[in-house]
Image: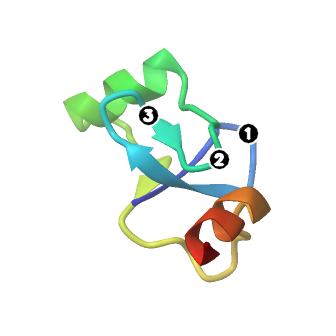
Amino acid sequence: MYFVKRGCDIYHILSDASSGSALCGVAMSNLEVWEYRQRKTAGNVKEEKPADKPLCKHCERMTAE
């Protein structure tokens, strides 16, 4: 799963859905986590990263190790 912080274009790899944190340590806001859990307007969480959007370099590095 991938997520993007509101107002940003860089996607992160979701490592812990309960806390909304990424591999690189970036976390979704409490509102974004709540929306994701409620399946409301969680448009910031995707099963697959859009091909035209960049992946966080730190997340990319963490998956390569």
Q: Nearer the viewer, residue 5 or 22?
A: 22
Picture layout, residue 59 above or below residue 50: above
Q: Label 3 amino acid?
A: Gly
Query: Are there few (<14), some (14-19), or many (20+) residues within 10 Å of tag 3?
Result: many
The CA distance from mark 3 to mark 2 is 12 Å
- Whether residues under marks 3 and 2 lie with C-beta atoms below 8 angstroms apart, the answer is no
Q: Nearer the viewer, residue 9 or 1?
A: 1
**Nearer to us: label 1 or label 2:** 2
Q: Nearer the viewer, residue 47 or 25?
A: 25
Picture layout, residue 35 above or below residue 61: above
In the picture, the disc for residue 20 is 3
What percent of the width, then of the height, locates residue 47? 36, 66
**Nearer to us: label 3 or label 2:** 2
The answer to whether residue 5 is left or right of residue 57 is left
In the picture, the disc for residue 24 is 2
Residue reaching furthest to the bottom:
51
SS class, disc 2:
loop
What percent of the width, then of the height, locates residue 23? 56, 50
Q: Quadrant of the N terminus?
A: bottom left
Q: Which residue is mark 1?
A: 7
Picture layout, residue 26 above or below residue 47: above
